[in-house]
Structures are given as structure tokens and as C-alpha cells.
Amino acid sequence: MADVARLAGVSHQTVSRVLNESERVSSETRERVLAAMTKLNYRPNPTARALASGRSKTVGVITFDTPLYGPASTLFGIERAAHDAGFFVSVASLRSLDMPSLISTSDDLRRQNVEAILVIAPQREVAQALTQLPHDLPVVAVEAGPAEGVPVVAVHQFEGAAQATRHLIELGHETVWHIAGPGDWLEAVDRVDGWRQTLEVAHARVPKLLVGDWSARSGYELSADLVRDPGVTAIFAANDDMAAAAISLAHRMGFEVPQDLSIVGFDDTPVATSVWPSLTTIHQPVAAMARAAVDLVLEEVHRARHGTGTPRQLLHPHTLIVRESTGAAPPPEGTDAPGDDGPPHDGGP
């Protein structure tokens, strides 16, 4: 910095102001300092800047090793939003989703001098562990989290599942079967609750719950008996992969979607528009949620430094995207379809 100041003909403090994007520097002086930096190939040392300012401009992200669309897309969105806010991201991926692993990983990030931690691990045990982390480092849960004590950014999973179920009930289906996600996922639990309570409010029968693991294979296997059952006319799957697998199985078994069976997914992933017929699903605003998570964690950093404000929980709205995989309930067996006048009349009495 001293070399840059000498070449630009300014003070060491002026170089520091330029680096920190202070408005107390004229445009002419700023350009002169930047030109000197370029000529000298000067790059600020992040460790030295962190020691001098007490700020690392780095956010830690704890996630888990998964190919699932939601967590992976959320991580990508967080990295972009943090970069736009002038922050670096240090990612730590958990192999084991338990309290010791979470605490150990947060300690590793703390040693990297991160200013806060975002956690993308919406499992029940992780959410409980978040409340046990030391309170001197801001933590924000993304996608799902504990009911209180930790700021959370998520989509209203209960209402999303309720809207998916209502959509099918309003199309005339007597009930809706649900292929759920794993029971240790908070999002899966909320979707089950939304499905069940919507059926109860509609005075519809609540069928036996089927539990998958988010994979297309589990959706395929669990929907086999449903597709064969003529009494099943509507399925709500907890994610698009399982819903798309149900559509594939229905085709393989000679049934038509939605004429024989209506199917709804959740997430609005790319598979929703690549499957045929295109999938009715619940859209989650992943990019907007990621930006909100970065904004909230920076808000928490400010709150920790200045002792102002209270932790917030932000629930983003979902959107029902109606496509081609849902339609009116087929008529019960033994009844004529709408517009069917029955067999030709022979003219007798």
C-alpha cells in the first residue's frame, strides 16, 4: 500500500479509502490510485485486511453431500448473491447429519474467521442442533429450520402442499394420495401436514401415507399399486422426480395422464417441463430465497455488531403452476362419461 501511495502521490489513508470504496475520495484521485495498483500488480491481502478491519467479508455455508435440486440450486444462488454483496463464500459439506458434525464444522468455519454461517440442511436433527451452536456467531437456516431461536429463510411448505391438494379436490377427485419425502426432513413433514389437513377440511378420506426418499426410483416403486387401483385418480408427490416417475409408470402400464390419473409434483425443477405430459407442480422461488438468505445473514452480522433488532423468519410465497398432468376426475366405473349417450337405442319401449 505504501508503494501504491508513493506512485499515486497520495497518502496511505487515501489508498485505504479507495480499497474500502469510501465516498470521501474524488473520482480523479480514485482513478490515479487504481492506475497505480494496476501498474504495480497490487492485490489486497485478505488476511491482513481482516486483521486490520476485524472483518473477513466471508460467509460460511454448511450444506450436505446431495445431488438434490433444491439444496444444490440454493447453494448456487447463495454464492451468486454473496458475490454481488461483496462477500466471499466458504462452503463446508457434511457427510453425517448429526449434532457433533454440525458443531465441528461450524468450529472449522469459525477458525477461517467467517462473519456468519448459513446452513442448508433441512433435516430435523440439524435444525435441533442449530439451537445449540454458540451465540457469538450469527447463524441463519435456509430452506427449513427450528421454529424459534434461529433466523430462517424458507418457502411456506405447508401452504404449498395444501394448494396442490386443493387443486386436485377442486377438479372433482374424491381424495388425493400422497407420496411423501423422508420423515426426517422438515419440508417433507410440512408437506404431509398440508396434504392431510386439506383433505380433512374438505371432508375427504385420508388415504394411507406412502413415504419415499425423494428419488425417482422410490416414486416409481410406490406408485405401482396406486396406478393399478381404479379407485385412485389423483396423486400428489412431494417432489417432481417422484411425480415424474409416477407419470412414467402410468404410461408403461397403459394409463393416460390426466384422463385416468392426475399427478402433481413439488419444486418446479427442470424435469417438470421435460416429462410428458408436462407436470403441474408447486414452484419454489429458489433464487429469491437465496438472495433473501444472504440479506438476512448480513442483517444478522450488523445486529451482532450493534446489538439492535431481533431475529426474523422469512417465509417466501409459493406458486401453483398448472400444466398438463392434472385434469377433471374420471367418472366412476359403470357410469357414462360426460357427453356419452350410451348404446344406440333400438326404438323399442
Image (cartoon, rainbow, N blue to C red):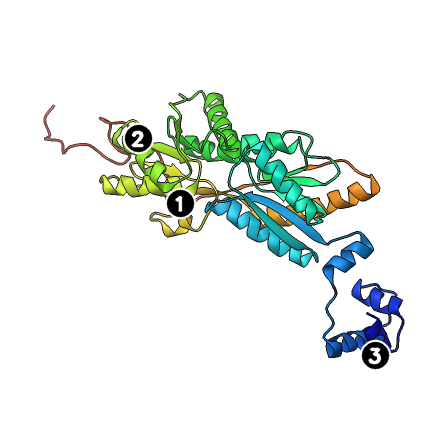
Q: Amino acid at mark 2?
A: Leu
Q: Quarter of the image containing the C terminus?
A: top left
Tell me: 133 left or right of 321. right
Residue placed at 83% from the left, 65% from the top?
Answer: 16
Q: CA distance from mark 2 to mark 3?
A: 76 Å
Q: Which residue is mark 2?
A: 226
Q: CA distance from mark 1 to mark 2?
A: 18 Å
- Residue 7, which numbered label? 3
How far from the left and from the top, in percent, is residue 3?
82, 74
Q: Which residue is mark 1?
A: 279
Instruction: Say which of marks 2 and 3 sits in front.
Output: 3
Q: How many marks?
A: 3
Sequence-earlier tag: 3 or 1:
3
Instruction: Bin the neighbour count of mark 2 within 10 Å (Cα to Cα): few under 14, some 14-19, many 20 and up.
Output: some
Residue placed at 83% from the left, 63% from the top?
Answer: 22
Kind of element beneath mark 1? loop
Is there CB contact under 8 Å for labels 1 and 2?
Answer: no
Tell me: 5 left or right of 169. right
The part of the image, by quadrant, that contains residue 85 is bottom right
Instruction: Return the residue nearer the eye: 336 or 205.
Output: 205
Q: Is residue 176 visible?
A: no
Kind of element beneath mark 3? helix
How far from the left and from the top, in percent, is residue 286?
56, 47
| Residue 154 to residue 176: above or below | below
Instruction: Say which of marks 1 and 2 sits in front.
Output: 2
